[in-house]
Amino acid sequence: MMASDLTITNHHVALLGETLCRSDGLEHAAYVLFGTSRIGKDPFDHEPRLRLLVKEVLPVLDEEITSADHQHISWSTKRFVELLARADREGLQLGIAHSHPGGPSNFSGQDDRNEAELVRLARNRNGDEAVMPSLLFVRGRLVGGRVWLTPATVTDLSYARTIGGNWTTTFFAEPERGHAPALVRQELALGAGFTTQIGHLRVGVVGAGGTGSPMLQQLPRMGVKHITVFDPDRVEHSNLNRLYGATWQDAEEGVKKVEVAKREIERMGLGTQVMTFDSWIGSAECRDALKSMDLIFGCTDDHDGRLLLNRLAYYYLIPVIDVGLSLRVAERHGISCLEADGRVTVVEPGNSCLVCRRIVNAGVAAEEALRRTDPEEFERRKAEAYVRGEGNPSPAVISFTTSVATMAVEELIQRVNRFRGAEGDVANRVRKFHLLEDFHPGAKKEPCRICGSDRAHGAGDVQPFLGRAG
């Protein structure tokens, strides 16, 4: 049976907890609109997967309830049918959530019968593609979930990911816990729970170059067990000053950067599964893998790639930690001085996006897309000064690329472990290495329609992919 899981923001978890688990001791219910991410082939187990994305919560109103006590709730399904029409128009799925005030932490026989009727209604109204998710809360906590595929077929959610500040995974079945001798001393600092959480994450790294390479050295050693690397480039001699594990022979032979990354991770012998894609991330062959990730590190230096990841974070509720490094040699008082700025930006609902933070330039992104899809036209426009030229190569120093990668990993640790405290999240940090200072630049006052409106948040699969033309 198809595996399924859930992604929900902390905001929606809190809203459902307040709505369903009140002090009156009665069962309560809510409707939930879900976006869906249908994955044809998971990169690690090669099986199909359905990911549900909580988009909107609509409490069942008191006047709709026909009866309720501490063990049951019944309500009119009139609004359920009305919401099915909206779900059909907007390409969403309609489900429910309800509470068991005093337990049990599992669905009852009455739940089974009632929900089977609701999925029958959903399929009669919206067709055979309609599914009916159901979530169960006990004492303010999400304790279970499942998806009705037909009135006779139901599959349990394997886990729920919570994003939007604190990142947690709630396991609905006991997760596999193995002895990890290599992580003993890390667990003294961060705890065994951190190992379980991070070992379950599917982490993507887009770009295996200057910042991606040190990232890929750290993540497996911290206990990440599932890593996917995306990079279409090959090793060149100029990469060898900052590409961990790459050799002169790799450059001579033009070995793919993703193959160097996979080779070096597997040499660690830590049991990390590594999948690689040597295509640009917008290519169709990368789509299922991107959608399968729980977290993505953006280590690419192209604006079009960043723009795609920017949208992915909101449409699919997959946090992106984007990194950047700028090295400049400036003249001060007649002396050449190095200025080094490292940046780490966390992109997810509740945070401003890369466009609103002026990190991505849509015009440059369009030029990069043209160069990739129609190189002849790009060269013609460049000759006529309609697009920018290639420019000079950027400076690169391994100590700074490694430091920026470490800043990004620290932000992952904070989101999972809270080592800086509950208020210690930093959505956008710029470290000026030459000044020994960190800055937290803001964003535009008027946010864009991607990060500033919840219309795209959790929308999941839409046509065209991510709402991008071309």
Image (cartoon, rainbow, N blue to C red):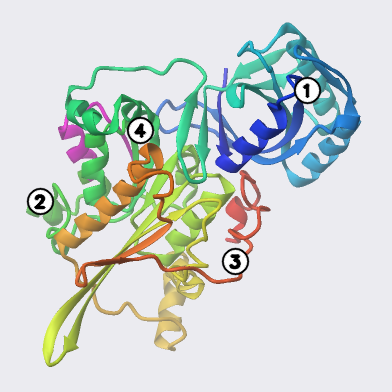
Q: Earlier in the sequence, mark 4 or mark 1?
A: 1
Relative side of 84 to 440, left or right: right
Residue 283: horizontal and vertical position, in percent? 47, 51
Residue under pointer 1 = 119
Q: Earlier in the sequence, mark 3 or mark 4?
A: 4
Label drawn at residue 198: 4
Residue under pointer 2 = 247
Spatial CA distance of label 4 from label 1 is 35 Å
Query: Amino acid type of disc 2?
Result: Thr
Can residue 239 be spotted in the picture?
Answer: no
Spatial CA distance of label 4 from label 2 is 30 Å
Query: Amino acid type of disc 3?
Result: Pro
Q: Earlier in the sequence, mark 3 or mark 2?
A: 2
Quadrant hosting residue 176: top left
> Viewer-nearest of labels 4 and 2?
4
Examine the rendered structure and indicate whether residue 81 appears above or below residue 420: above
Spatial CA distance of label 1 from label 2 is 58 Å
Tell me if label 4 and label 2 are in contact, CB under 8 Å. Answer: no
Quarter holding the N terminus is: top right
Spatial CA distance of label 3 from label 2 is 45 Å
Spatial CA distance of label 3 from label 1 is 38 Å
Tell me if label 3 and label 1 are in contact, CB under 8 Å. Answer: no
Q: Which residues are magenta?
A: 261-276
Frontmost residue, 222 versus 371: 222
Residue under pointer 3 = 447
Q: Residue furthest bottom?
A: 334
